[in-house]
Image: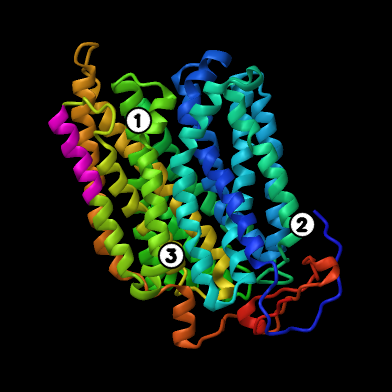
Amino acid sequence: MNVPPQPPVPATSAPYRWRWATLAVVLLAETMDLLDSTVIGVAAPSIGADLGGDSSALQWVAAAYTLAFAVGLITGGRLGDIAGHRRMLLIGLAGFTAASALCALAPSIGVLIAVRTLQGLFAALTIPQTYSVVVSVFEPAERGKAFGAFGPVMALASVGGPILAGGLIEADLGDSGWRAVFFINVPLGIVAILGTLRYVPESRNEQHARLDLVGMLLISAAALLLIYPLVQGRELGWPAWTFVSMTAALPVLALFQQWEKRVTRSGGSPLVVPSVLARRAFSGSLVVGVILFAAMNGLLLVFGLYLQIGLGWSAIRAGLQIAPIALGVAVGAVGAGAVLVPRFGRAVLHAGAVVMAAGVAAASLTLHHTGGDVGGWTLVPSLLVTGVGMGLLVTPFFDIALASVEDHETGSASGVLNANQQLGATLGVALLGTLLFNAARESDGSQRAAAYTEAMEQSLWAVVGGLVLVAVVAFLLPRRPRDEESEGEGTQPDGPDSAGDTESVSPSHGMPEDTGVTTSPAQTGGARQ
């Protein structure tokens, strides 16, 4: 997508005028992705009834998106560094919106799976740009507030996706049925594209760089070897090849790391800046992230499956039962962002893990004592506490995770962080889904509710164990969010691309334009309108 360059303007110390509008745009992009990741579980039965296909085909409607998204994330982040974050954001949003419309119009299950793959690839271009855009428009002192908005929005979108899908399918507007869950992305995508054109300035971390094609192939192969068996393993009963494939991913990752070091030594442009993974704090955040999102996404999946399959609830009723989690997330997020994180920093992560674990444990004990008779308000207190803990956890996570990363590394770091999040979500869905179904597979009609309730209790205790690990491993992360780390250390990006790279924002018509030059507030001292 070609954007006409505008003459650069001198750098000033004033903040960028449209930074909060820019944040709203990138959060809308994140919401679109998360909605598409979560609605399929509710929409799958309707899709199967309309288009046909066995359970494996329906699973691939979700898996095709997951695989394409995970495989392309790191490459998408690097393309933003090289070609410009705004440009890649626009291309990604346009492609994602078009693919969503094609999904809604799909005439067969095969076409739907193919278009979902395309949708995942465009999402992989879109999502890594969001963190880099935030870094480019916010000064260090405000980045904590900006990044703090990611956590609650992502958590609420994850929880709200099934509720929205159930409502749209139930409403059946214009006889659209399941197709409405994809059509909803079209107006959202158009708003996001117009917002990007109007408010988001261009930024990139490198000029005259080339995409590391060998690195791209290696990391894509590693992601495929790792995530494909996780997606297919439960459906196929975990045959031997799934474990061979996951094991084979490790030497491919090691080869990728060595290749990236070689590219760096030769003066090339690596797909992932090696210094990112060499930072202990960032590596620790990857461990925390994979466990956190495995627990969070796995919990939402098995809870929905338990209510619909085990207890026979409708999709909309199951979605509404999860609503207390969304309310709790909102409460926890507001408290964390406005009061707790600025004062206590990383300690909020530990507290969030403990609170969420307590809520999940209480839900398991409630199921045990009620025997699955969970109608009405029975689970509301425990789910509300779970949501508060989730809000406390996710709100500061991304800001703290990026605290040790320099501005010129944000493209690589955001791609890795997003890929890691997707890996955690896939891992949680695979492990907890397997645990739930294995524990309940011998049940018949009369014993189904009791068997699924017992299986759900076990799954919830597994989530508690994961959250305890999060609370412990979080000690590896920086003590303070990104803005406070930067101010406290007084450092500026000192990587190979920090010198001589400047970006500016054109005041033409009050909107940012691509100047053909790169920028970062830390490098320019705040080149903003």
Tell which circle, 2 or 1, labels the residue nearer the N-terminal end. 2
Give the CA distance from mark 2 to mark 1. 43 Å
Mark toward the viewer: 2 or 3: 3
Residue 225 in the image, given as x and y percentages of width and height:
45, 43
Tell which circle, 1 or 3, labels the residue nearer the N-terminal end. 1
Residue 111 in the image, given as x and y percentages of width and height:
64, 24
Observer-nearest residue: 406 or 238? 406
Q: What amino acid type should be assigned to the residue bearing mark 3?
A: Gly
Q: Label 1: state its secondary structure.
A: helix
Q: Label 3: state its secondary structure.
A: helix
| Residue at figure coordinates x 36%, y 46% from the top left | 296
Q: Is residue 167 left or right of residue 397?
A: right
Q: Is residue 425 left or right of residue 434?
A: right
Give the class, few, some or many, for how many residues have Cα within 10 Å of label 1's Cα (few <14, many ≥20): many
Location of residue 415 (image quadrant): bottom right
Give the CA distance from mark 2 to mark 3. 29 Å
Residue 292 in the image, given as x and y percentages of width and height:
35, 53
Image quadrant where one finds the C terminus: bottom right
Residue occupied by mark 2: 197
Residue 120 in the image, given as x and y percentages of width and height:
59, 41
Magenta residues, start to end: 358-370
Observer-nearest residue: 250 or 484? 484
Residue occupied by mark 1: 234
Dominant secondary structure, magenta: helix
Based on the picture, tell me whether residue 362 belongs to the magenta stretch.
Answer: yes
Q: What amino acid type should be assigned to the residue bearing mark 2?
A: Leu
Residue 214 visible at all: no
Kindly identify which numbered label has been placed on residue 337.
3
Mark toward the viewer: 2 or 1: 2
